[in-house]
């Protein structure tokens, strides 16, 4: 497992995609169990929103770990039309307590987050930064209101 030290940059990547098949709850649970194990190995944390047809995921960790996880996602037959929304360094982990958390979300929320402006220089806890990074702010607010159990 990679260890994040104070000097290790934290890399984040957000993407949206369509589900290439009709996933049942059991399929999604199997994906989450596998992803959670792989993310722990890579020391990657993050969150996943799913509306039944679209995914929006935010990953964070060391550059190599995030790249490894994203390579697995890109090679998965479950994803189609993958669009990177953000890729770059961030000042800290925003979702440090989940190796993989998933919530069913309304399609309109996923669309708002996908369409919002992404900016690596923001912090979701600060009101003024919410204006600079509306996408991360919307994502963080969704999770802080309706957080799933820690995985």
Image: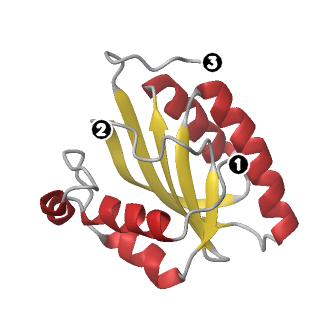
Q: Residue furthest left?
A: 128
Q: Which mark is residue 42?
A: none
The residue identified by callout 2 is 90
> Camera-side residue: 96 or 121?
96
Q: Secondary structure at mark 1?
A: loop
Left or right of 79: which side holds 60?
Answer: left
Label 1: how many Cα within 10 Å (few below 14, some 14–19, many 20+): few
Q: What is the crowding at mark 3: few (fewer than 14 residues within 10 Å), some, or many (at least 20)? A: few
Nearer to us in this view, 54 or 126: 126
Q: Is residue 113 above or below residue 125?
A: below
Q: Position of residue 109 (x, y in %)?
A: 45, 78
Q: Which residue is mark 1?
A: 76
Q: Earlier in the sequence, mark 2 or mark 1?
A: 1
Q: Position of residue 95 (x, y in %)?
A: 47, 47
Residue at image point 78% right, 74% down: 22
- Which of the two discs, 2 and 1, sits closer to the camera? 2
Q: In the figure, is residue 35 to the left or right of 93?
A: right
Tally of numbered tags: 3
Q: Nearer the viewer, mark 1 or mark 3?
A: 3
Q: Is residue 83 found left or right of 103 in the rendered image?
A: left
Find the residue positioned furthest to the right.
26
Q: Which mark is residue 1?
A: 3
Which type of secondary structure does the marked residue at label 3 adopt?
Answer: loop
Q: Position of residue 62 (x, y in %)?
A: 45, 26
Q: Earlier in the sequence, mark 1 or mark 3?
A: 3
Q: Quadrant of the N terminus?
A: top right
Q: CA distance from mark 1 to mark 3?
A: 23 Å
């Amino acid at each position: 497992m990679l260890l994040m030290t104070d000097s290790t940059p934290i890399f984040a990547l957000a993407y949206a995609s369509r589900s290439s098949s009709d996933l049942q709850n059991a399929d999604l649970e199997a994906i989450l169990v596998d992803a959670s194990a792989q993310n722990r190995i890579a020391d990657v944390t993050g969150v996943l929103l799913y509306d039944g047809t679209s995914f929006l995921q935010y990953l964070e960790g060391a550059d190599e770990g995030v790249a490894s996880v994203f390579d697995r996602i890109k090679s998965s037959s479950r994803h189609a039309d993958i669009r990177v929304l953000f890729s770059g360094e961030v000042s800290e982990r925003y979702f440090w307590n989940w190796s993989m958390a998933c919530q069913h979300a309304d399609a309109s929320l996923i669309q708002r987050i996908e369409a919002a402006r992404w900016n690596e220089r923001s912090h979701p806890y600060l009101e003024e930064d919410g204006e600079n990074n509306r996408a991360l702010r919307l994502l963080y607010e969704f999770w802080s209101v309706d957080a799933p159990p820690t995985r």
